[in-house]
Image (cartoon, rainbow, N blue to C red):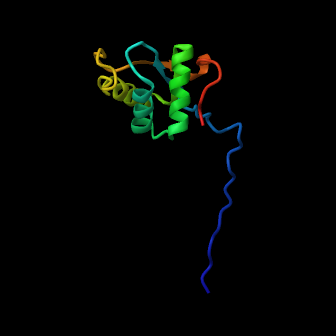
Amino acid sequence: MTEVATTTQTRPSAADKPETKQPRLWNVVLLDDDEHSYEYVIAMMQRLFAHPKERAFQIAKRVDSLGRAIVLTTHREHAELKLQQIHGFGADPFVASCRGSMSAVLEPADLGGDGESLEA
């Protein structure tokens, strides 16, 4: 018969484990202007963020009434990508005088945002 040696290992306690920090979250904030229609905002929210039509409409209403709306909260790299996509979405085909894309900014999510957010 063969003898098998076994050893017992103890797991480190929670106090011994290094604390891993979660990445900081960022809000993608759409800014209002007078050059873009509700239809444009709704189409952009559906295409870039896959928001359903009703949610996209609520974002359009919010940006129109408050001047800004959080459209996504995510990690920095994804937020930067979505910001670039908003800035590259192009002019509003429904408004003849529109000269380009809407504006948006990134803000740390832990700063509070714009009040009641539309996050899912």
Q: Give the position of the N terminus as an image quadrant.
A: bottom right
- Residue 52 visible in the shown view: yes
Left or right: 100 with respect to 113? left
Name the one closer to the observer, 9 or 97: 97
Residue 68 location (% of width, % of height)? 52, 17
With respect to residue 4, does 26 lie above or below? above
Task: Give percent across and percent down for residue 28.
Answer: 48, 24
User: What count of labels does the image hold?
Assistant: 0
Coordinates of residue 34 in the picture (x, y in percent)? 41, 12
Judge left or right: residue 109 versus residue 32.
right
Query: Residue visible at 65% across and 63% down?
Result: 7
Residue at horizontal 60 percent and vertical 21 percent from the top:
110
* Closest to the observer, 53 or 89: 53
Q: Position of residue 36 (x, y in %)?
A: 39, 20
**Between 74 and 67, which is closer to the camera in this rendering?**
67
Q: Residue at x 62, y 78 (%)?
A: 3
Q: Is residue 24 visible?
A: no
The quarter holding residue 16 reads top right
Quarter of the image for the C terminus: give it: top right
Query: Which residue is nearer to you in this view: 92 or 120?
Result: 92
